[in-house]
Image (tube, rainbow, N blue to C red):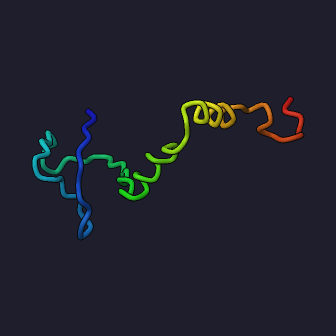
Amino acid sequence: MQQAFEAIYENGTFRPLPGENLTISEGSRVRITVENEPEPKALELALNVFADFTESEIQEIEEIALNRDHFFGSRDAS
């Protein structure tokens, strides 16, 4: 069974946030994968990366970024 929930880590313990409905039996052994929330400022910057570009400019940037023809420079890729 997989179950995702938000928690706070404090004093060596993960504490689920209020309102989280967990279906885990007391004493159960679980595997935890930690995924940090992005810093609000970093998230804001990421969301505004293309704010001043036109749709055409954004498309051109994305095409350049996704073009792997020159990914290895002058090195022969074969």
Q: Quadrant of the C terminus?
A: top right
Horizontal arrangement in the rendering, residue 67 relative to residue 26 (left or right): right
Disc count in the image?
A: 0
Q: Quadrant of the N terminus?
A: top left
1, 21: nearer the viewer: 21
52, 45: nearer the viewer: 52
- Residue at 18% across, 53% down: 16
Give the image location of residue 9, x and y in percent.
26, 62
As drawn, which residue projects farthest toward the bottom?
Answer: 11
- Residue at 24% across, 70% down: 11
- Residue at 47% across, 49% down: 46
Horizontal arrangement in the rendering, residue 67 relative to residue 32 (left or right): right
Residue 40 appears in which quarter of the rendering? Answer: bottom left
Give the image location of residue 57, x and y in percent.
61, 35
51, 13: nearer the viewer: 51
Residue 73 appears in which quarter of the rendering? Answer: top right
54, 70: nearer the viewer: 54
